[in-house]
Image: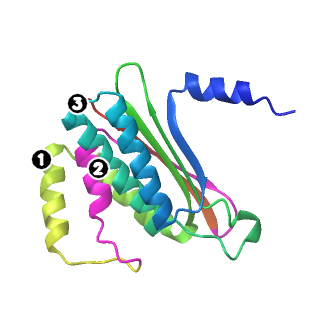
Amino acid sequence: MFNVFDFYEKMEDGKIMLSFKGVITPDLLSSILQIMESKLDNLGEEPRQRKKVYNVLVECLQNLYHHGEVLTSTPALADKASLFLIGRNDNGLYRIITGNYILNKSIPELKSKIEQINAMNREQLKAYYLQTLNNEFYSEKGGGGLGIIDIARKSGQKFDYSFSKVDEEFSFFSLVITVNNV
């Protein structure tokens, strides 16, 4: 039998505040953000830190919603579209973990973008954000690439990421974001 207390203890030890696995919908986005806003308030977090964490959460969840592949062509994977976790360690650092399926053909471009962002300092990120904002380029899913740049700017940390091949068409993209203290 599945031991729920063991599972609870693992989440408690990992300082997991909220986790979700499934298909991201607009209603779910609103609910998660309301829950996290309440949790951040209850923790007595400084307003500046609360705003920073909340803004990074919004961008992460929007990325899952807009850019994750819903695997309708693979029924066994259709309900496993996305993964989201947020935790806070004893030092007050927040860790946001997202995961979603991605087309293998999309990996080189995303990896290149993340590596480019990871190589930039704060001033370079700001300039890149403004350049991207003004170039009026939109991906086939409608994004201009500002979200991931904004996450890097607000988190103050480099991205940790990986791609795990699922089959010839899809991989699972994992992104770990640590949000600096104020």
Q: Of the residues shown, which amino acid type is indicated by label 3? A: Glu
Label 1 SS: helix
Whole-percent x, y for residue 54 in the image: 31, 46
User: Residue placed at 16% from the left, 44% from the top?
Assistant: 122
Q: Please tell me the numbered disc located at residue 165.
A: none
Residue 148 sits above or below residue 96 on the image: below
Quarter where residue 9 is shown: top right
Q: Please say whether residue 152 is one of the residues in the magenta stretch.
A: yes
User: Residue placed at 40% from the left, 51% from the top?
Assistant: 33
Label 3 SS: loop
Task: Locate the C terminus and report the quarter of the image it occupies.
Answer: top left
Reading the image, the residue beneath label 3 is: 46
Reading the image, the residue beneath label 1 is: 123
Residue 4 sits above or below residue 168 on the image: above
- As rendered, which of 161 and 13 lies closer to the eye? 13
Reading the image, the residue beneath label 2 is: 55
- Report crowding for label 1: few under 14, some 14 to 19, many 20 or more residues within 10 A (C-alpha): few
Reading the chain from its start, which is encountered first: label 2 or label 1? 2
Whole-percent x, y for residue 88 in the image: 42, 29
Region rendered in magenta: 141-169
Residue 86 sits above or below residue 56 on the image: above
Q: CA distance from mark 1 to mark 3?
A: 25 Å
Whole-percent x, y for residue 64 in the image: 47, 60
Is 180 displayed left or right of 66 in the figure?
left
Q: Of the residues shown, which amino acid type is indicated by label 1? A: Glu
